[in-house]
Image (cartoon, grey):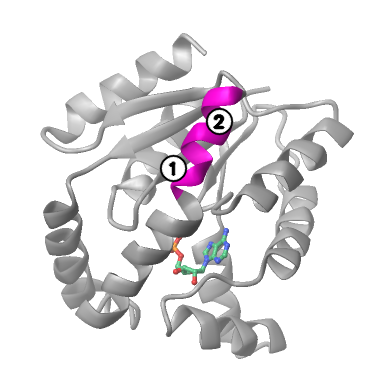
Amino acid sequence: MLNIVIFGAPGSGKGTQSARIVEKYGLTHISTGDVLRAEMKKGSELGIIAKQYIDQGQLIPDDLMIHILGEVLDKAANPQGVIFDGFPRTIPQAEALKTLLAERGQEVAVMLDLEVPEELLMTRLINRGKESGRADDNEETIQKRLQVYHTQSAPLIDWYKKEGKHRLIKGYGELEQIAADLFEAIDHS
Ligand code: AMP
């Protein structure tokens, strides 16, 4: 059982590289952003609530997000393991994930931290917005999301360092090289 957290600022390539990892290790991909966008598309009650936060570049409150994650995790039973993309984003979420996995006799093997310079994140996200049409990929919301990343999510780096699970990966340059570095970190976790 291999449970991985892929971490990094918005635009750091978590989604792109998760796909490579899923292909190689047969993991289930859980992207909380994708889960929320699917709910928004359905127009469900959860989607309507989520939209208010996502459009502002803010995080969905921890208690709600943790509840959603628990439900998704139950449905995702995969003996190979899971890659968590976009979760945890706060320390309470990391603590909840630890508990949720421990209750299932599991743990996070490694936290892969994709490091990308700020100006590159900005360009990537603006370009993605043009292609994906994601409402939160506009300059104003991107600035907010980066700010939220620095204040609320970046403290997770130290949290996972204390757990002995943090691995810093250069998240720019050749896509193949990034994937190779990620695979090496996973194989040595
Ligand atoms: P993402 O696709 O991971 O960039 O997520 C898009 C948006 O969904 C974020 O800007 C948040 O508003 C919301 N979101 C996704 N994952 C989480 C999470 N773990 N905690 C709180 N909000 C989240």
Q: Residue at x 63, y 86 (%)?
A: 49
Relative image position of residue 17 (x, y in whole percent)? 34, 40
Span colored in magenta? 154-162
Tell me: residue 130, above or below residue 127: below
One can see residue 147 in this view: yes
Three-letter code, disc 2: Tyr
Of the two numbered discs 1 and 2 in the rendering, the one whose residue sits closer to the viewer = 2
Residue drawn at the location 44% of the way across and 47% of the way down: 154
- Is residue 161 part of the magenta span, yes or no? yes
Q: How far apart are marks 1 and 2 (CA)?
A: 11 Å
| Residue at the top extreme, as displayed | 188
Residue 103: horizontal and vertical position, in percent? 88, 35
Disc 1 target residue: 7
| Type of secondary structure dominating the magenta stretch | helix
Q: How many labels does the image show?
A: 2
Provide residue 170's location: percent of width, then percent of height. 23, 30
Query: Within the image, what quadrant is residue 148 found in?
Result: bottom left
Mark 1 is surrounded, within 10 Å at the Cα level, by few (under 14), some (14 to 19) or many (20 or more) other residues, namely many
**Residue 117 percent across, percent down from the top left:** 17, 46
